[in-house]
Image (cartoon, helix red, strand yellow):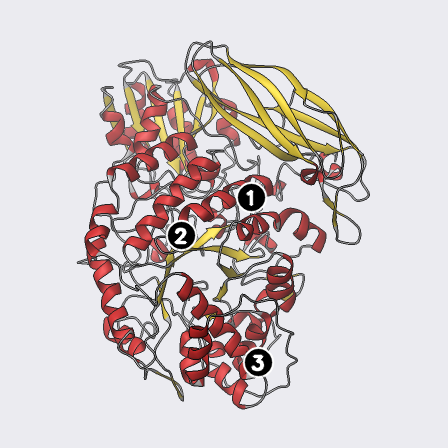
Amino acid sequence: MISRRGFVAGAAAVATGLPELAPAHEPQPSERVDRLVAALSLEEKIAQLNIPVVIPGEPGTSAVSTPEDQDHYVLGGLKHQDLVLGPGGGFFGLVNESLFGSIDVDHPKTPKEQAERHNALQKLALATKHRIPLLQISEGTHGSIGPGSTIFPEGLGLGATWSPELVSRVYGVVGAEARAVGIHAISTITAELNRDPRYGRAIWSFSEDPYLVSRYVETLVPAAQADLRTGPVVSLCTFPAESPNVGGLEGSSIELGERELRNIHLPPWKAGFGAGSLMTEASEQTIDGIPVHGSPKYLTEILRQELGFRGVVIANGFEGLVTDRVAATATKAGALALTAGIDIGLAWHDAFLTGLADAVRNGMISEALIDRAVRRVLTLKERLGLFENPYADPARARAIVNQPSHRKVALQAAQESMTLLRNEGGLLPLKPRARLAVIGPNAADARNLLGEYSAWPTFHAVPTILERLKATGHPITYAKGCETNGTDRSGIAAAVKAAKAADVAVVVLGEELKGGYFNPGRTNGELADIASLDLTGVQQELLEAVHQTGTPVVLVLVNGRPLSTTWAAERIPAILEAWLPGEEGAQAVADVLTGVTDPGGRLPITVPRSVGQLPMYYNIKDARAKADQYVDLPSTPLYPFGHGLSYTTFAISNVRLSTSRITRTGRTEVRAEIRNTGKRTGTAVLQLYVTDDEASVAVPEIQLRGFAKVGLLPGASVSVTIPLRADDLALIDANLERVVEPGSFTLRLGTSATALPHTLRLTVI
């Protein structure tokens, strides 16, 4: 069973009384939308509210697994139990034929063919009685999902750039490529935080920090959506949180207090909805005992009334309402979900099919609630311009997808994501013509660079790290050594032999994501939670064997979650965190190792020494920050949030405030000078953290509240200004109200959460 995009079982319907929630403030529907809602039958309305995930494969794999099934759904008359549906509302993942590489596809559709298939379905839809166009949704986590699309760094890789401007350009490309082939909404753009790296779905998140994620989300939404006539809607996922879940396990509950939810987890959502996001996916989790799918508090009161969301809520976790025994039947689950505020079902689940029909017929809910959801869906289609022009331009799709300018953005994003964790003795950049032994399971594996939910297959070459290092002119010997998983040690001897004959050993280790859902060796991604953050398989043995040769080692990590490489941090002189860098990742790794570019990345997440330290993030409260050490381990992180080295050095000076006293609605500026004191061009990321010296409730010890990324030539200097508003100092008080309390604040400026040499004082009056 695929829990999030998956296969579901049926359930019988039972009528139960259910109170209806007063409607939230809604955008005024157009005359066309009102006219259509009045004309549609109940069965036609329910079809508009179901946009099923396309699970490719044999007939019967899903309700719309084959082109014939899809045509049938669009035209109307597809039967689910005793419900005969009207013309369908659209599809989720129609162009994702390989299920992210899980299924072999003999003849994957090119971008032009993707546009043509979408157009053929739209033509069928416009031939039906009410002429309602289809809404096509697909994943867009770090690239459009259609084969041939540009694949960017994923999750923490983009987060490590510390560049909202660059991330906005990335999603501008994602949006343009998606809309070009006929996709109207890109999903799984993650506004939630990575607070437990064991959790496989955390691979999509940018950072553990709400301020940093907020800056990314507020810039990427308008960049991707454009004017909604040329860009897709951004679907932020998954509201209000999918983690930290108990044990880091898929489907386990979230035990999170409301103050923590509001103070830490909600700010990125406020930023994204404020920037205009018109779609969000409801969390499948239970938060403090309340299943989100059935919660008016989360999906209407907080989402719409507090945060001002004015779009459509999609959902895929109806079975959780039954599993948690909140609803005894699918009918009750569907009624709860609709009442709570869910508009579109993705899972082809009884709850949002026969369950909705039975709930209306049995008087459990009013048809007016169905109408509310249908109005939202039709209004979104109208805002996208689909009633006037539902078609994609196949020629434009062929021209725009993965064009050279898009690959250039992918390369820049990969380069700026490269995070240098260690460089003892200046081993990097590599000396020209140094003899290299390139070793490890990810050295010659391009697919593991691409991450999860990436467009596969590609129609363009994706090079490996080995190939790009060979192109630098270094003499190279290659030995795989081992797999990312398993116990086969037979290749370690060849790796040792190669290392002994080399000047430097470049060992490329990490995680495996290729093969999608059905690869038993996959170590990260959805449905791939882990109980250890150590290197998998015998990779650690390989690394130790190569180190024992005495040849200097550069460790390159290819991974989507932080790994507890404690042994390496004590012995390996150079460690480069490459994340999941996308299709241009191999070039970016080669550029950084050889000094063509400076490593521009900084950690967007805290790296623990051991999984036993979890939960671990920099913005902990004082009680944890000042707690005793473990008996068997330091309580400090292996690498702190914000950490990352350059090939040059910098000096920060003349740190000051524009004003040291502000009102509770005022603002100030932190100003500083930074100079490149080294001999190479390099990148610095100045980070501003705030401490509330005395608060009415316990708050984090430090909180990121500003940053500036600058690139400088040798000897060059620049003035940096970081704005700080009084609202940036707000907290959630004992009454769960967001307030700015008067008092003293300590401001710290530096280069990571633990390297903050410059201190200022600010008073709020």
Disc 2 marks which amino acid?
A: Asp
Residue 236 seen = yes
Q: For the N terminus, which image quadrant?
A: bottom left
| Label 1: which secondary element | helix
Q: Is residue 343 above or below residue 171?
A: below
Q: Please tell me whether mark 1 or mark 2 is closer to you in this view.
A: 2
| Label 2: which secondary element | loop
Label 2: how many Cα within 10 Å (few below 14, some 14–19, many 20+)? few
Q: Which residue is mark 2?
A: 227
Examine the image and state in which quarter residue 699 appears. Answer: top right
Q: For the C terminus, which image quadrant?
A: top right
Q: Is residue 184 left or right of residue 604?
A: left
Disc 1 marks which amino acid?
A: Ser
Question: Where does residue 155 sit, x and y in percent of width and height?
Answer: 45, 43
Label 1: how many Cα within 10 Å (few below 14, some 14–19, many 20+)? many
Examine the image and state in which quarter residue 214 appears. Answer: top right
Q: Is residue 632 left or right of residue 40?
A: right
Q: Which mark is residue 332?
A: 3
Do the residues under discs 1 and 2 have CB atoms within 8 angstroms? no
Question: Where does residue 79 sit, x and y in percent of width and height?
Answer: 35, 84
Residue at 57 percent of width and 42 percent of height: 208
Q: Which residue is mark 1?
A: 214
Do the residues under discs 3 and 2 have CB atoms within 8 angstroms? no
